Image (spheres, rainbow, N blue to C red):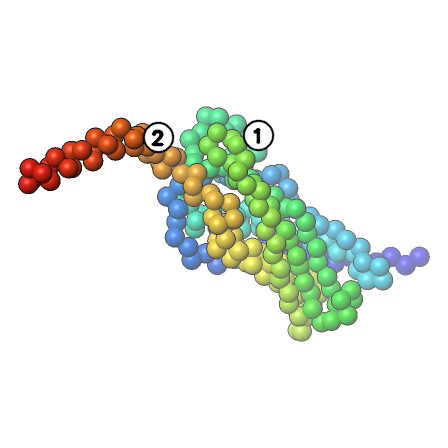
Amino acid sequence: MLSACSSEVALTELTIPRPLVAKMPMVVAVKYPANFDRYVYEEEIIGADKWQIDLGSSNRKLFNSIFDAMFESVMVVKAEEELTSLAFDAYIEPEIDAFEFSIPAQSRTPAYAVWIRYRLKVFDASGTQVASWPVSAYGKTHGGKFGGSESLHRAAILAMRDAAAVIGIQMDKATGISKLRRGDALSAVTMGPVTTEEAKAEQSAAQTNAENGS
């Protein structure tokens, strides 16, 4: 009997360029699911190799880098830890929705490609979910002088860099997370809206001052 060979890809060293964005003056809590530290994708391609892609802790490193660049203060919360005793403006829970790859044997091209779809769930300080944002990332490289494992490794890194760029540029627009800053909400509650009677009183005082020439 013939059995497929096994090819392994492990992302042990991940370097993600720091997003060039202005930090939001917010305290953000982040809770990573357990599979962020041990995500392994396996697929056997008929007539080719059986592939195992081990992302290891690269997902956590990716999001730590992104969030450290985006927010003034970030606290990483353990999966089993309760949030009720913590003070923060927003809470983020990243997930991996899907992972796919292709090799030349499938695409009939020299390309190795990786697709990753993340999902960022955003909650306010009271625990109410305000957004569930899917983020699709893509990376492609050609075999050339690199072997299949190295080429797929490079494609996976490019996909993660793509995710970092998308999140850094579009997250606030897509989720409205900056509006969850408690300082802004507290200021609005403390000051309160100007009532009609207050507006009339201010208008009357202004008119009296004008008549008196002050």
Q: What numbered label is drawn on residue 189? A: 2
Marks 2 and 1: which is nearer the front?
Answer: 2
Q: Amino acid at mark 1?
A: Glu
Q: Classify mark 2: helix, strand or loop.
A: helix
- Location of the N terminus (image quadrant): bottom right
Instruction: Place residue 184 in its image quadrant.
Output: top left
Let me know if residue 16 appears in the view: no
Q: Residue furthest left?
A: 213
Is 44 in front, or is 27? 27
Residue that carries the numbered disc 1 in the rendered image: 80
Residue found 9% across the figure and 38% down from its top = 211
Q: Earlier in the sequence, mark 2 or mark 1?
A: 1
Q: What numbered label is drawn on residue 113? A: none
- Location of the C terminus (image quadrant): top left
Q: Residue 22: x and y, percent?
A: 39, 52
Instruction: Please state if 209 lies on the left or on the right of 140 as rendered.
Output: left
Q: Residue 91: x and y, percent?
A: 49, 37
Let me know if residue 47 appears in the view: yes
Report how many numbered discs are placed on residues in the image: 2
Residue found 43% across the figure and 34% down from its top = 88
Instruction: Place residue 112 in its image quadrant.
Output: bottom right
Label 2 neighbour load within 10 Å: few <14, some 14-19, many 20+: few
